[in-house]
Amino acid sequence: MRQQADTAALGIWVFLATEVLFFSGMLLAYTVLRHAYPEGFAEAGRDTKIVIGSVNTAVLLTSSATMAWAVHTAKLGHRKLLTILLVATAALGLVFVGLKGLEYAQEYAERLVPGLDFSSDSPHAHAIELFYFLYFALTGIHAVHLSIGIVIVGIMAWRASRGAFGPAYYTPVEITGLYWHFVDLVWIFLYPLIYLNGRSGG
Amino acid sequence: MPKPPRSLVWAWIGLVLLLALTLGMAFVPLGSGNIVVALAVAAAKAAVVLLVFMELTRGHSLKLIFAGAGIFWLIIMFGLSFTDYTTRTGFPPAH
């Protein structure tokens, strides 16, 4: 059993290593374009919704803490608390996605969506459009990852409520936790690149 | 109701304080220092998540190698790309 658990944990780490590369292709594009168009990227970054972005960062960090607590609880075998913590984690994930949706709606209304309805009268309009293209790609794919996480955490909560996990068997909760923390890690780097970029100037 | 482990509570407090720090520092004009501070704080937050929440250094030591492999290829990708982009003439293209 211990070896099975170790193998499963190593498997998710391999998967997460490939996920690093999946996201970093877009992060490379961001770095190159930011280097090429510093003024345009700063101007675009200043107009991002920093309140929603910061609240969402706090929400996601908190959800990681409840997730880590859930894994700890699974090891101890407290069935009810484990269920509550997993539901809380999924609920915080839903709050994040909800706020993200609100943000997208505002950006659509402000005509900031490249390819769909983009318009800017700034001299850096071209660079701003590139910024928003990467913004929607990065945050969109992050939101897809988070949504998958919410479904998996939900399934874990359902299984936990039926008493599936205890001190002898909690690997699925542990693996789900590692995936959830990874999605949090991605956001930890997206937050300064998108929302904090260009705030001190202009 | 059982209390959360102390280490998790401290990690969460640390993460929220780091978020407040990076948000505040973003409005202080430091020129190119802003991105350095922002990424340093992000790296500190990532370290808390990796070490406390993901227990990277506990259990099987192979997972350190697997996690390191992701970072290793990331460095190769950025490193080789920038030998190109930083030495290229005519980039970005003029409009």
Image (spheres, coloured by chain):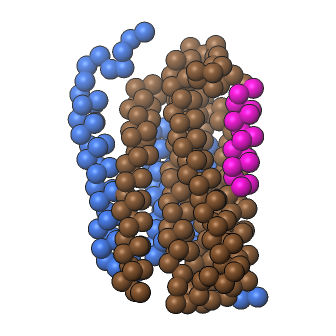
Q: Quadrant of residue A196?
A: top right
Query: Secondary structure of the magenta portion, mostly?
Result: helix
Q: Residue at x 72, y 25 (%)?
A: A110
The residue closer to the viewer here, A64 or A80, is A80
Query: Does residue A104 belong to the magenta stretch?
Result: yes
* Rendered colour, chain B: blue
Residue B58 in the image, given as x and y percentages of width and height: 40, 80
Q: Residue at x 64, y 59 (%)?
A: A150
Query: Does residue A198 belong to the magenta stretch?
Result: no
- In the rendered image of this protein, does residue A161 appear above or below residue B66? below
* Rendered colour, chain A: brown
- In the rendered image of this protein, does residue B50 appear above or below residue A151? below
The residue segment tinted magenta is: A94-109
| Residue B50 appears in view | yes
| Residue A188 appears in view | no
- In the rendered image of this protein, does residue B5 appear above or below residue B55? below
Q: Quadrant of the C terminus of chain A?
A: top right
The residue closer to the viewer here, A75 or A139, is A75
Q: Quadrant of the N terminus of chain A?
A: bottom left
Residue A89 in the image, given as x and y percentages of width and height: 67, 66
Residue A158 in the image, given as x and y percentages of width and height: 69, 72
The residue closer to the viewer here, A158 or B19, is A158
Residue A195 in the image, given as x and y percentages of width and height: 60, 41
- In the rendered image of this protein, does residue A3 appear above or below residue A176? below
Q: Residue at x 64, y 67 (%)?
A: A155
Query: Number of numbered discs present?
Result: 0
